[in-house]
Amino acid sequence: MIKVLFICHGNICRSPIAEFMMKDMVNKLGIAEYFEIASAATSTEEIGNPVYPPARRILNAHGINCQGKTARQITRRDLAYYDYIILMDSNNMRNMKWMFPNEDLGHVRMLLDRNVADPWYTGDFEATWSDCEEGISNLIEELRETYSI
């Protein structure tokens, strides 16, 4: 089982979009049984809140349901459990280093070589969708090659 955790600031926009997009992609590829995919936040600001309505709408527009997802914060246990911790932006990396100063973060990396567009500030959920689609497609390809699936 390949365990992937997506991280953004609040876990109500970008990381849930990435989580449910990847679940949908691996399902459509017929390889879902190889993956455990989730998402979390670096902050405590949105804990317990559902996916932000515009993020839900863009997922729904693509036939993806995220019902029941609520925001949670990453834990030290998550660091040990997940094989890949995928960040949406450089601020998430800064926060991870602050939160876990003595932990090995070798399996923590950015989804793209740039920040994923943050729709919380721009309202542009299409840009976020496009960034996530690019990064997740590349991630799946990499994982399929690495694990021969």
Image (spheres, rainbow, N blue to C red):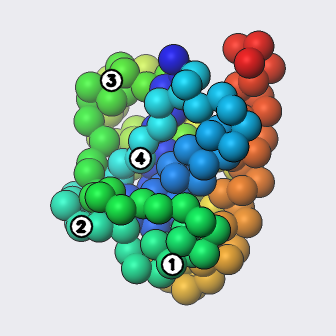
Q: Are marks 2 and 1 in contact (CB under 8 Å)?
A: no
**Camera-nearest label, 1 or 3:** 1
Q: Is residue 65 above or below residue 84?
A: below
Q: Nearer the viewer, mark 4 or mark 1?
A: 1
Disc 3 target residue: 102
Question: Residue visible at 27% across and 48% down?
Answer: 73
Q: Position of residue 40 (x, y in %)?
A: 36, 48
| For marks 3 and 4 on the same chain, the one whose residue lies earlier in the sequence | 4
Residue 70, label in figure: none
Query: Picture quarter containing residue 86?
Result: top right
Question: Circles 3 and 2: CB distance less than 8 Å?
Answer: no
Quick one: quadrant of the C terminus? Answer: top right
Identify residue for label 2: 49
Circle 1 residue? 57
Residue 43 visible in the picture: no
How far apart marks 3 and 4 lie (CA) works out to: 22 Å
Crowding around mark 1 (Cα neighbors within 10 Å: few <14, some 14 to 19, many 20+) is some
Q: Indicate the amino acid at tag 3.
A: Asn
Q: Residue at the spot x=59%, y=66% of the render?
A: 63
**Disc 1 on helix, strand or loop?**
helix
- Closer to the chain start, of discs 1 and 3, is 1
**Residue 144 spot, x, y in % from top left:** 75, 24
Q: How far across and down, in percent of the image, does residue 113 sit? A: 73, 49
Pick the front one: 107 or 91? 107
Q: Which picture quadrant has residue 114?
A: bottom right
Q: Residue 39 shows which numbered tag?
A: 4
Q: In terms of depth relative to the viewer, which is nearer, 90 or 52?
A: 52
The amino acid type, in three-letter code, at marker 2 is Asn
Is 147 drawn above or below residue 125 in the view shown?
above
Look at discs 3 and 2 and give the one toward the viewer: 2
Distance from the alpha carbon under mark 1 to that under mark 3 = 39 Å
The disc, 4 or 2, on the residue closer to the chain's N-terminal end is 4
